Amino acid sequence: MKLHSISAGYFKLDGGAMYGVVPKSMWNKLNPADENNLCNWALRCLLIEDGNRLILVDNGVGDKQDQKFFGHYHLSGETDINKALAAKGFHSSDITDVLLTHLHFDHCGGSIKRVGEKLVPAFENAIYWSNQDHWKWATVPNDREKASFLKENILPIQESGQLQFIATPEQGLKETGKLGITAFSDNISIRFVSGHTNQMMLPQINYKGSTLVYMADLLPSTGHIPLPYVMAYDMFPLTTLEEKKSFLQEALEGNYSLFFEHDAFNECCKLQQTEKGIRATESFTLD
């Protein structure tokens, strides 16, 4: 097995929304905002060589939206994921699986490309993985969240015939007090969490005898490790709080490596126990 960090560029989001109830005087030290209160965030994907499978976890915003849309998010850096794949020696046609943690536009926008008047899968030979509960949640969205679920990113996946669902665990957090986990391959399990959005999937990878977890939006950055740092974007913030508390204790005890999708400064970290609670330590890159 080999792991590769794949950049789909950077974008900006409101700092207050990203840090929820935490005062700006505190979070601004972690990720300084510009004059419009916007902070820079990474769009960092993960490429997994796992036997004869080449698995891409999330794929950024993509390039098919109009300029008005992009004007809200100020994309920067190299946003063409194909160039990032080529730098690692791969082509979009090599991808066998696209594992979508959830269907918000900044995680799945690169799934679909525009070819003339048609919307088609950007990874033509890949199976696209979601789960049935989240798919329904995204395709029949609530009023608060529907701006993040763009039909042009989602429905063409199903129309292509390339969509498959990962089975959700029979028992989840509410029944057992533990985060639900199900198998994806011999080396990859899927953790299910529902504070940010219903049934978000976090790949947990057994890599050379250690564990690496792709954090998606449970922990967008190292700055979100302290328990009160919960995004205003989360649908169920108290659920996020409990999911974070449970996961962080397990990750600390298991010496897990955490891989951050949105942290503009830190790609991975380990955890340590401090007087203030569990915090990041030993920041590093996959390389």
Image (cartoon, grey):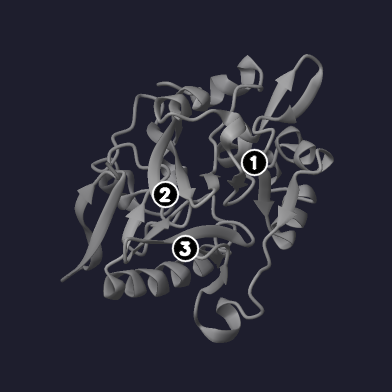
Residue in the picture at 51% in, 58% down? 202
The numbered disc on residue 76 is none
Residue in the picture at 66% in, 30% down? 122
| Circle 1 residues within 10 Å: few <14, some 14–19, many ≥20 | some
Closer to the N terminus: mark 1 or mark 3? Answer: 1
89 w.r.t. 249: above or below: above
Q: Quadrant of the C terminus?
A: top left
Q: Position of residue 218 (x, y in %)?
A: 46, 57
The numbered disc on residue 220 is 2
- Res. 174 image quadrant: bottom right
| Circle 3 residues within 10 Å: few <14, some 14–19, many ≥20 | some
215 w.r.t. 18: above or below: below
Q: Position of residue 259 (x, y in %)?
A: 36, 51
What is the three-letter code of the residue carrying label 3? Asn
Closer to the N terminus: mark 2 or mark 1? Answer: 1
**Residue 283 vs residue 188: left or right?**
left
Q: Is residue 21 visible?
A: yes
- Residue denoted by label 3: 187
